Amino acid sequence: MEFAHISFLTLGEATQLTRRLRLATGSLLVDAACGAGGPGLWMARESGATLIGIDPAEAGLVAARRLARQSGLGERARFQLGTFQHTGVADATADAVMTVEALQYAPDKRAALIELRRILRPGGRLGIVCFEVDPGLVLGVPALGTDPIADYRELLRQCEFTVEVYEETPGWQERVYGAFKALVDAQGALVEEMGEQAAAAVLAEATFTIEVRPYPRRILAVARATPL
């Protein structure tokens, strides 16, 4: 079964996250802002972990549930409405939490990390793939301009995490800018496939990213929940 990537995650990055989060059979993995569920389902399948996917969009959850059934993971994966600040997961129950290319959009990143720390058991690990954002380039920009973070390490420490890995992902610029340019070049087909409103949002992000380049780096981080 093939799992569609969400945004720009590579197979190598998913493999690295699975290993660094120390996932194993019976582990509970929570995927925050899971979208259609692909990366979390792939990691659950490869490791034997149980998965809870959290997302604020019902359409993404419907797609994730369908993919779970198609991949034979329907019995150990569930998907529910929630946000970074309100996951709906019980205290100290997750062995690992992941979030892929979504944290840069969280309106309050401190509150998001505090919530993810709450649901992790002591010693559990948080895996993040996301973009650092240059605050000076996103003033007044919706979503990205709200609480932009240029480096997540100090915030992670303040939220009771010990940073174990924090590194720029190789080759991200070619993938990101190449994909966004392809979207802009194919905007007619995009409108036909997605509809005008949805396509307009995608194209606005693509154009802004190409022209402004607000992301200094795309990073992969792993941080351990420090015992309280």
Image: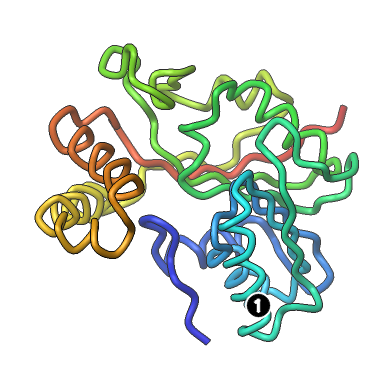
Callout 1 amino acid: Arg
Q: Could you tell me how many numbered marks the image carries?
A: 1
Residue under pointer 1: 45
Q: Is residue 43 left or right of residue 148?
A: right
Q: Considering the numbered disc 1 on the image, is that residue within a helix, a strand or a loop?
A: helix
User: Dividing the picture into quarters, in which one does residue 217 lie?
Assistant: top left
- Above or below for 26 versus 2: above
The front one of 227 and 191 is 191
Q: Is residue 3 above or below residue 21?
A: below
Q: Position of residue 84 (x, y in %)?
A: 66, 36
Badge 1 density bin: few <14, some 14–19, many ≥20, Cα 10 Å:
some
- Quick check: 216 above or below 122? above
The answer to whether residue 134 is left or right of residue 151 is left
Residue at the (84%, 70%) spot, across then down? 26
Q: Residue 182's x, y, as percent?
A: 15, 57
Identified at 44% across, 71% down, the residue is 4
221 on left or right of 141: right
Horizontal placement of 10 versus 160: left or right? left
Q: Quadrant of residue 51?
A: bottom right
In this rendering, the answer to whether 52 lies above or below 100 is below
Q: Choose between 182 and 165: the one closer to the eye.
A: 182
Measuring 54% from the left and 30% from the top, which residue is drawn there? 106
Residue ID at (65%, 77%): 45
Q: Quadrant of the C terminus?
A: top right
Residue lying at the far left of the rendered structure: 185
Given residues 193 and 32, the one toward you in this image is: 193
